[in-house]
Amino acid sequence: MRYSLYIKQAWQMMKHQRFFSAIYIIGTGLAISMVMLLAVVYHIRTANIAPEVNRNRTVYVDRLSYKSKDNKSTNNFGCGTRFVKEVILSLRTPEDVAITAIPLVMNLNDALYMQAVGMEKVKQVDYLPCNAGFWKVYSFHFREGKPFTEEEVEAGIHRVVITNSLARELFGRSDVVGQEVLMNDVTYTVCGVVEDVSSAMKDCYAEAYFPYTTSNMVKMTGMPGEMSASIGCLQANILLKDRGDMPELQAELNDAVKRYNATLVEGRVEVGDARANGFTLMGVDQNRTYLVVGLFLLLFLLVPALNISGLNASQMQERMEEIGIRKAFGAPSRTLFEQVFVENLVLMLPGGLLGLGFSYGLVY
C-alpha cells in the first residue's frame, strides 16, 4: 500500500519539478545507452553469432614480415599466395582453414562494379575473395545454389556467390543461379545466393564472394619474386578442433615457417603469434581487453551517477523539513529510506527505458 503512495508522490514531484526530472531522466538515459552500446558492440564482436559461429575456436594469421638477408629492409603485410599454399594449407592441426583477402585492403584499393549481363544497372559492391574452406569455417544460409569448390578455386574458375539483396537489386529476383554477371567487365557465373550478412561481421561480410585465385588484387600482390609470393593481401582464418589446440597450432606453424624459410634465398619470413579472436585492443591479450572495457563501462556509469547524486542531494536539502516532521512523528529511518529509494527508482525508470531504446537505435 505504501509503495503505491510513494509512486504517486514521485509522480507528483516529477510533474511539479519538470526541469529537475528532465535532467534526471536524460542523465540516466544517456548513461545507460552508452553502457549498453559498449556492451552490445563488444558482444557482437566476440560472441558466436551467425555466420561467425566458431569465433571461440578461430585464430587468425594476417600479419607477416619479410626481411632481407642483410636485414636492411623489412616489409610488413598479409600472407602471400605461395606462403598460403606451402605453410598455411599444410598445417594438420586445424579442422579447416578459410583463406580470404584482407577485407579493408580489398575494398579500399580495388573497387568492384557488378552488372547483370543484359541489364543496365551497375552497382559498386563490397566483396571478399576466399577459398572453399571459407564456407566450412563460416555458417551461411544458402537460399539458392551452393558454394564454389576447392577444385574451382585451384583452377581459377569464375564463380561467384552473391547475397539475396544484391541478386534482387541486379536481377529483380533471387533465383539467379546459373546467371552471368560482369565484375569489372569480367564475366562470372552465379553459383549461389546467400542471406544478407551484417556489416558488423568483420571477417565474413560482403555482398559478393568469389575464388581468391581470380582476384586482380591478389594476382598483383602475388607477382613473380620471392617477397611478392611470401607476403600479400591474404589472411588465414583457422578453425581449431578445440580451443586448447592453440599451443599445438603455434608450434606447428613455427616449424612450417622454418621449413619455408629454408627454401628462400633473398630473405626470410617472420610470423607473430597466431591471433585469437576476442576484439583485442591495440594487440593486448584478451584478459587485458576485458579489464579495459570494464573500466570504460564503470567510467560511463560513475560520472553520470555522481552528477545525478549531486542533483539528488540538492533535492533532499529542500525536503529536509518534510523528512524532519515525519521523523518527529515516529517514522522509522527504514521507511524514509524506502520512500527515497522508490522515488528515485520511479525517476530512473523512464530514463532507463529511454536509454535502452536509444542504445538499440545506435547499434542498428
Image: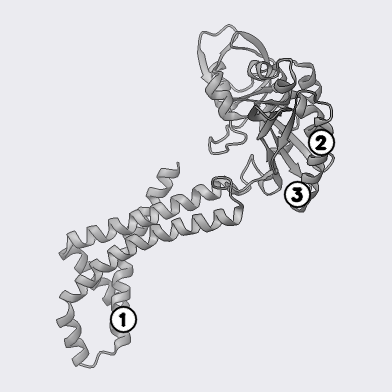
The mark nearer the N terminus, 3 or 1, is 3
Please provide percent x and percent y for residue 176. Answer: 64, 18
Residue with the mark numbered 3: 246
Q: Name the residue under label 2.
A: 258
Query: On the rendered image, what quadrant is the N terminus found in?
Result: bottom left
Q: Is mark 2 on a helix, strand or loop?
A: helix
Q: Which mark is residue 337?
A: 1
Per the model, the C-alpha gap separating discs 2 and 1 is 70 Å
**Residue 125 place in picture, x, y as percent:** 54, 21
**Between residues 296 and 357, which one lies in front from this camera angle?**
296
Q: Label 3 is placed on what type of residue? A: Met
Q: Position of residue 354 (x, y in %)?
A: 34, 54
Report the Cα–Cα distance between label 2 and label 3. Answer: 19 Å
Name the residue located 33 percent from the left edge and 69 percent from the top edge: 345
In percent of the image, x 58 and y 11: which residue is there?
184
Residue contact between numbered discs 3 and 1, judged by CB atoms under 8 Å: no
Which quadrant of the structure image shows residue 238?
Answer: top right
Q: Which residue lies at the image location 43% right of the left edge and 47% below the top edge?
A: 360
Q: Residues within 10 Å of mark 2 (few under 14, many from 20)?
A: some
- Give the mark toward the camera: 3 or 1: 3
Vertical side of 100 occupied by 311: above or below: below
